[in-house]
Amino acid sequence: MTAELTEPAERPFSILVTDDDAGSRDTIAGVLADRGFHTRTAVCGEEAIEIVRCDTIHLVVFDLHMPRMTGLEALQQVRLFNEQLPALLVTAEPTREVLRRAQQAHVYSVLPKPVNAHLLVHLLRRALSTAYGER
C-alpha cells in the first residue's frame, strides 16, 4: 500500500472493530493494523461499549447484525458517554432503511460487506480528519 495511508507511528489512532464474525473482524483489524493504526477488537456490542468506556478509542467500526445488540444499538449506548466518537457501519445489506437509520445515528459512512480495503481506509481517514483534524 502507499505510504500516504500510513499513520505516524508515534501517535497512531486507536480503532475498535466490532463484529461477531471472526473472519470479518480479523480482516478489517488486519487491514488497519497494516496501515499503522492501533486496533482493538470486540465480538459483541456489549464488549465494545466496555472497551470504549475504559480505553481511548478514536473511531469505532460496527457490524450492523450481531446477536443480542446490533451495531446501531451499541453505538447508541456508546454515544451516551461519548457523543462525538466517529463511527463506520459495515453490513451485508445496505438497504435504504439501514442507510436512513445510520444517518439518524450520525454514522460517518456505511460500508457494504465484503469490505473493500481501500474504501475502508479512505473513509476511516476522512472520518478521523473530520473529527480530529490533521495529525
Image (cartoon, rainbow, N blue to C red):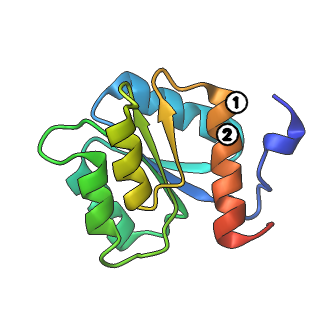
Residue 16 lies, with reference to residue 57, above or below; the image says above
Label 2 crowd (10 A; few <14 / some 14-19 / many >=20): some
Helix, strand or loop status at disc 1: helix
Contact between labelled residues 2 and 1, with CB atoms less than 8 Å apart: yes
Q: Which residue is mark 1?
A: 118
- Which mark is drawn over residue 14? none
The quarter holding residue 67 reads top left
Q: Which residue is mark 2?
A: 121
Q: Identify residue type, mark 1.
A: His
Q: Percent position (x, y) of residue 97?
A: 32, 40
Q: Percent position (x, y) of residue 44?
A: 24, 45
Residue 47 lies, with reference to residue 90, above or below; the image says below
Q: Percent position (x, y) of residue 56?
A: 49, 69
**Which one is in front, 10 or 44?**
44
Q: Residue at x 65, y 45 (%)?
A: 123
Count of numbered circles on the image: 2
Classify the position of the C terminus by image quarter. Answer: bottom right
Classify the position of the N terminus by image quarter. Answer: top right
Label 1 crowd (10 A; few <14 / some 14-19 / many >=20): few
